[in-house]
Image (spheres, rainbow, N blue to C red):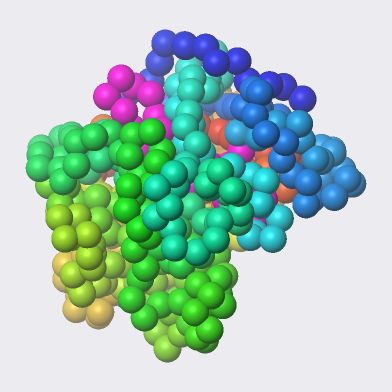
Amino acid sequence: MKKLAIVMTPLLLLLPASSAAAAEPDSAGRATLTGFASLPALTFVPASDPSGSALGTAPINGVTPPFADQPVQGFSGIARNRDGSFDVLSDNGYGGKANSADFVLRIHRVIPDFGSKTVDVVGGINLTDPRGLVPWPLTRPDRVLTGSDFDVESIVKTDGLAGARGGHAGQEPAAAMEHDGGYWIGDEFGPYLLRFDRAGRLAAAPIPLPDVYAPERAAMLGVPANLGGSRGFEGMASSVDGRFLYPMLEGTVTGDPAGSLRIYELDRRAQAYTGTRWKYQLESTDHAIGDFIAIDRHRFLVIERDNLQGDAAAFKRIYQIDLRDRDRDGNADKTLVADLLDIADPKHLAGPGDTFRFPFQTIEDVVILDDRTLGVLNDNNFPFSSGRTPGQPDNNEFITIRLARPLR
């Protein structure tokens, strides 16, 4: 097992929803790979707590749990910093509430070096609740948050480069509601929205989503669940002016059309939902979304994916959506931006082939670097996913792609 070294490395960065038939597969042109970097799967936080005790002792993809330290595992959200680094949100641990009690929720700071094709982990913070703002019992008496307390899946930094555009992609929101370097994080157990300060301390009580109940919250309240497990706030965007958050569900609420996902609006000044919402239509009811970020006031990017990996992976795409719903069908308008299973690699940055595939089960991070360039990362579901090489745990890969056309 490789333990990470906390070192600094210079950043070398190239800087229809109407129906399934409405999004034309070849309307985007072909994206081109411009950068490839990888963080080994067996990367751990040094001198941290043991983890993975609920996974048993049988090898999983050649890796034998439990682990002496906390893995720097799959990333489910990303925020860009002014200094060229990125804050990435680790997933909730090992995929479920029952097996993730010893996985500490954490934000890592990473710097990709596309020259050496490596990713350096240069720091990080644990998420905690020292003020006792969570009103129900937590897993740990020291109130360090774990994957049994929340399933964190999306992140907006209050003092970073949101990736939304005012005049240029990546421009900082002009009137952000907070400038303290803290974070808003979307959860799937409630679903809840969580507000943390720059040190990772919970700053306010969890904000529940009215009238929507994931199984975990439903069990606490003794009410029926109307949202599937692990189907909460998978993506979350910030408005260009910073006032609003747009959290997006990964699953369909009971009673909604099949494959229809809700996008909500939260006023950061009031820290309350406005009552406005939109709908995104999946291309297939078997699909899920991986991330949701803003381009400008009306347009956003969505990762939509199937649940397959490796050679079986057939659908891993990034769409541009427009909340104005110009065809008046009740769903956000949808246009293909990039097919992540068909990326041109003429310089052979990732290997000898001319075509690069990003064939991971879960792809949960996209960030706008400029009008033509996106950063994309996978969630490696350590140690379970093996989309790159069968029988081996996936690394955390960080790629940049140049789009065939600008985001305009």
Residue at figure coordinates x 63%, y 60% from the top left? 97
Query: In the visual, does 117 lie left or right of 183?
Result: right
Magenta part of the chain: 73-95
Which sits in the foreground, 237 or 33? Answer: 237
Asked where in the image residue 198 lies, by quadrant, the reply is: top left
List x then y, in percent, for residue 288: 50, 63
- Residue 56 place in picture, x, y as percent: 85, 50
**Residue 390 falls within the magenta-colored stretch:** no
Which quadrant of the figure has residue 395? Answer: top right
70 up-or-down from 349: above or below: below
Is residue 277 at all visible to an observer of this figure?
yes
The image position of residue 347, as x and y in percent, is 50, 21
Residue drawn at (88%, 45%) of the image:
57
Point 77% across, 25% down: residue? 1
On screen, 134 above or below 221? Answer: above
* Camera sees residue 347: no
Give how far across and how far down residue 266 sits, in percent. Answer: 23, 62
Looking at the picture, tell me which residue is in the foreground, 174 or 205.
205
- Looking at the image, residue 71 sits to the left or right of residue 55; the answer is left
Residue at 26% from the left image edge and 72% from the top image edge: 278
Location of residue 300 by image quarter: bottom left
Specify the quadrant that holds the C terminus.
top left
Examine the rendered structure and indicate whether residue 74 appears above or below residue 121.
below
Give the camera-side residue of 36 and 78: 78
> Would residue 61 be found to the left or right of residue 166 on screen?
right
Q: Residue furthest right?
A: 58
Nearer to me, 3 or 117: 3
Magenta highlight on residue 88: yes
Q: How many dots with numbers?
A: 0
Check the image and report above or below for 48 versus 324: above
